[in-house]
Image: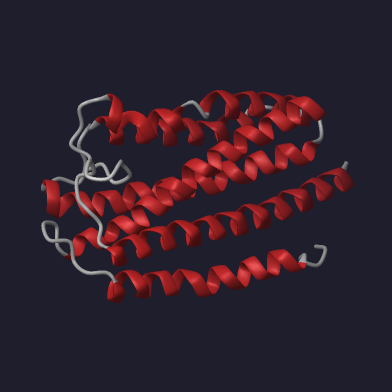
Amino acid sequence: MPNKPLLLRVLDILSIILIPAALVLILFFTPEEATMGAVQKVFYFHVASAWAGMLSFVVAAGAGIGYLTTRDFKWDWLSLSAVEVGVVFGLVAIASGMIWAKPIWNVWWVWDPRLTTTAIMELLYLTYFILRSGLNTMETRARLAAVYAIISVITVPLTFLSIRLFRTIHPVVIAPTGSADFNMSPRMLVAFFASLVVFTILLADLIWNRYRLAALQAKINQGGN
């Protein structure tokens, strides 16, 4: 495999350093929320992972448009990489949400609009891999996968807006001042935005590394043919 670009090496190092740093910030810098207590600290990673997952799916759709426009397989590699990383972040968001829900709602899962749309989004992108595996030619696989990624991205705004469009018990975190379900102190805000930044850096690092692996796999397949 070609040597890693310098920027990717920097992202690798930043990811290794910033993830534990964010954990320390959340555990020891932020105060406990008055109503939910210590379990509220899960939400920093929960929201950040959900953000990273949805951003990944937007990247996948953008890459799908890139492939349909140029027919360059590099865009297909990027779309595949973004979907794979997005699905992982989505699973982390669901798992961390369940950890929060059990002590707060006394159940691991409810079919709330936000949770339902999140589950649908995750299942759609899991189906993406089934679609790819069922197609034989590279061109057909890349074309249909691009179309699928573009269509499926509609679940991203639907999931984000579900707590505003429908009646829900899911707390509203990002909202105009005074309208959120709980107010964050200055320290909470620092940890909240720091988590978003850290997970965005991790997202870029993982997608780029996965893209390089996809490029290497393509070269090996071409060599085998």
Whether residue 39 sits left or right of residue 140 in the image: it is left
Residue located farthest toward the front when viewing the structure as drawn: 177
Q: Is residue 38 left or right of residue 22?
A: left
Coordinates of residue 99 in the picture (x, y in percent): 24, 55
> Is residue 39 shown left or right of residue 74?
left
| Count of numbered marks | 0
Query: Is residue 176 placed above or below 142 in the rendered structure?
Result: below
* Image location of residue 176, percent across then percent down: 30, 41
Look at the image and tell me in which quarter the C terminus lies: top right
Residue at left 69%, top 28%?
65
Up the image or down, 56 lies above or below 139; here it is below
* Nearer to me, 195 or 177: 177
Question: In the rendering, at what x and y percent does residue 139 appear?
Answer: 78, 27
- Colour setup of the view: secondary structure
- Above or below residue 223? Residue 190 is below
Residue lying at 19% horizontally and 45% vertically, measured from the top left: 181
Nearer to the camera, 131 or 86: 86
Residue 189 appears in the picture as rendered? yes
Q: Residue at x 38, y 35 (%)?
A: 160
- Point 29% across, 30% down: residue: 164
Position in image of residue 15 (x %, y %): 55, 68
Residue 64 versus residue 132: which sits nearer the camera?
Answer: 64
Q: Is residue 136 visible?
A: no
Quarter holding residue 118? top left
Q: Quadrant of the N terminus?
A: bottom right
State whether residue 201 is above or below residue 84. below
